[in-house]
Amino acid sequence: MHAWRDQIMFGLAIALVALIFMPLIPGLFWAMSPAFHLSVWQTLWVDPQWKQALLATVLSASIGTTLAFLFAITMAKQLYPGRRWLQLRQRLPILLAIPHAAFAIGFFFLVAPSGWLSRLVALLSGWVMPPNWITVQDSYGLSLALALAIKESWFLLWVLLAVLSEQEITKQMTIGQTLGYSRTQVWRTILLPQLLPRMGWPLAAVFAYGLSVVDMAVILGPANPPTFAVLIWQWLTNPDEGLQAQGSAAALVLLGLLLMMVTLVRFVWQQ
């Protein structure tokens, strides 16, 4: 009975999504049609920027997603259940409401070579000039990955809040602690095996955002070349029709990369 109900609900969800996106398909086809020419792909392949840009994007998205998951799980393991977990639940909407660009600007001012952290160290160490360190806008997007990890960990915590609020999960945590298991043992043997399958799509959403983010990448990501998403945005907004077509082809590359990574992770998980 439950299986039939789940299938019906899944079918209704697919139908609603199709109803929303069906009117967009003709416009999407018109926008992407220039990318269906072989010459556009040949031009994209010989472009000197896209390989380094794609590498920075893949690294920042992958590292950011992994760290965001580790941050969220670590915080949940330390705080759940208890008073501090309830306090986090009350304050989490405020953290989620912070715009990504505003967070990126604050992060830039914090960790830049002449930022607030360096100024604090300068007061204690007597620095006259900021150190010659690359802490933001590095070539591989590592500072962008760290900022994405912090910001997206709040989203994953919001997902965990919903899952851990279920009565069955709370009961299992209580029973495990009553039987003398430590918090770490309960999380490792009871909670994580149940949470990981349910975190799949939220993690895919975080990875998709990391691949396609533009505003945070402009502020914290590499500049020359930029990340792949920023490069696509520059091409698509260029008045040159050739570059617009190149941007459409690059967007398809980004979409294919997302589908390939999601399929690969799903295949590995099922083994």
Image (cartoon, rainbow, N blue to C red):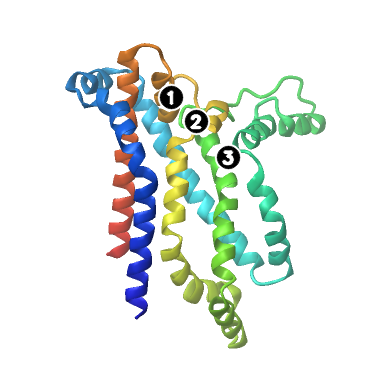
Above or below for 158 versus 104: below
| Mark 1 lies on residue | 233
Contact between marks 2 and 1 (CB within 8 A): the answer is yes
Residue 139, image x and y in percent?
Answer: 47, 27
What is the spatial separation of the Cα atoms under label 3 and label 1, in whole angstroms?
21 Å
Total number of numbered discs in the rendering:
3
What is the spatial separation of the Cα atoms under label 2 and label 1, in whole angstroms?
8 Å
Amino acid residing under circle 1: Trp
Amino acid residing under circle 2: Val
Q: Earlier in the sequence, mark 3 or mark 1?
A: 3
| Mark 2 lies on residue | 214
> Given the current orientation, which residue lies at the most extreme left position?
38
Counting other residues with Cα less than 10 Å from the Cα at mark 3, is it few (<14), some (14-19), or many (20 or more)? many
Residue 93, image x and y in percent?
Answer: 67, 53
What is the spatial separation of the Cα atoms under label 3 and label 2, in whole angstroms?
13 Å
Residue 69, image x and y in percent?
Answer: 51, 54
Above or below for 112 versus 46: below
Amino acid residing under circle 3: Ala
Q: Residue at x 21, y 26 (%)?
A: 36
Q: Quadrant of residue 6?
A: bottom left
Q: For this view, does 112 lie left or right of residue 146? A: right
Q: Secondary structure at mark 3?
A: helix
> Given the current orientation, which residue lies at the most extreme top position?
240
Q: Residue at x 59, y 46 (%)?
A: 150
Above or below for 207 versus 14: above
Q: For this view, does 91 lie left or right of residue 147? A: right
Counting other residues with Cα less than 10 Å from the Cα at mark 1, is it few (<14), some (14-19), or many (20 or more)? some
Q: Please tell me whether mark 3 or mark 2 is closer to you in this view.
A: 2
Q: Secondary structure at mark 2?
A: loop
Contact between marks 3 and 2 (CB within 8 A): the answer is no
| Mark 3 lies on residue | 147
Q: Earlier in the sequence, mark 2 or mark 1?
A: 2
